[in-house]
Amino acid sequence: MYLKSLVLKGFKSFADRSVLGFEPGIAAVVGPNGSGKSNISDAVLWVLGERNAKNLRGQAMEDVIFAGSSARKPVGVAEVELVLDNSDGTLPVEFNDVSIMRRMYRSGESEYLINGTIARRMDVLDILHDSGLGTGTHSIIAQGHLAEILQSKPEDRRALIEEAAGVLKHKQRKAKSQRKLERMDEHLARVRDVVAEVE
Ligand code: ATP
């Protein structure tokens, strides 16, 4: 799986529709300070379901919508579409190209589309669940965060390595199963009490 393209329209400094194409391997985005490089990684985070405006370097979610410039009026809607090449079947869907789109209006209304069909944020998270992409993962490391990681406690750094190695998701599933087992034990104890009372 790899990031194939990113389309931005009305998102932060990208007022006009801009299409970025990527090839497998390493891609670098270069440009002068303030030209919008970080806005591109913000767009990736946002389209994958980010809900915290601060993680997108803003105060409110509305800040992702192009706010106008000396030459342009503000726009009313921000749109980002991300296309992943899924020909290796990493994502649990039958499409070779998986398009995830997020749209947000100034009124606060927002929607997600998966391959052109309206979806919920949860559906986007579900598709990405085992891929290492998505909110809460370290697939995007923001400026300044790198130093934080290098200076972090060994246990925290270990969690990061586990995430990259794909171990973390199994740990999360184990914890979920353990919680379920505990709930079952409680139910069982209650049933035993009832049976004892009846007997
Ligand atoms: P640096 O190299 O300094 O980190 P950069 O290339 O990463 O810079 P960004 O931080 O991505 O630049 O872009 C900053 C620019 O985006 C600023 O000019 C800012 O005014 C503009 N910008 C951010 N949000 C919006 C918005 N909602 N509407 C219009 N412009 C915006």
Image (spheres, grey):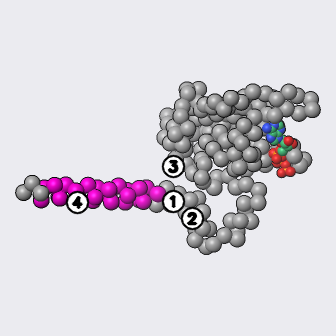
Disc 4 packing (10 Å; few <14; some 14–19; many ≥20): few
| Relative depth, front residue between 154 and 181 | 181
Q: Give coordinates of residue 109: x percent, y percent.
A: 63, 30
Q: Nearer the viewer, mark 3 or mark 2?
A: 2
Which residues fall within the magenta stretch?
172-196
Label disc, if present, on residue 159 of the rendered structure = 2
Q: Secondary structure at mark 4?
A: helix
- Looking at numbered disc 1 in the image, what kind of residue is underneath it? Leu
Q: Residue at x 57, y 51 (%)?
A: 132
Q: Which labelled disc corresponds to residue 130? A: 3
Q: Quadrant of the N terminus?
A: top right
| Front-most of residues 12 and 159 | 12
Question: Residue at point 59% right, 32% down?
Answer: 112
> CA gap, disc 2 to disc 1?
7 Å
Label 2: state its secondary structure.
Answer: helix
Image x and y of residue 106, in percent: 71, 30
Q: Earlier in the sequence, mark 2 or mark 1?
A: 2
Q: Looking at the magenta stretch, what is its main secondary structure?
A: helix
Q: Residue at x 35, y 55 (%)?
A: 180
Do callouts 2 and 4 mark residues in contact (Cβ within 8 Å)?
no
Q: Amino acid at mark 4?
A: Ala
Question: How many numbered marks, from 0 up?
Answer: 4
Whole-Å distance between the Cαs marked 1 and 3?
10 Å
Secondary structure type for disc 1: helix
CA distance for labels 3 and 2: 16 Å
Q: Which residue is mark 4?
A: 189
Confirm whether the magenta stretch covers residue 18: no
- For marks 1 and 3, the one nearer the N-term is 3
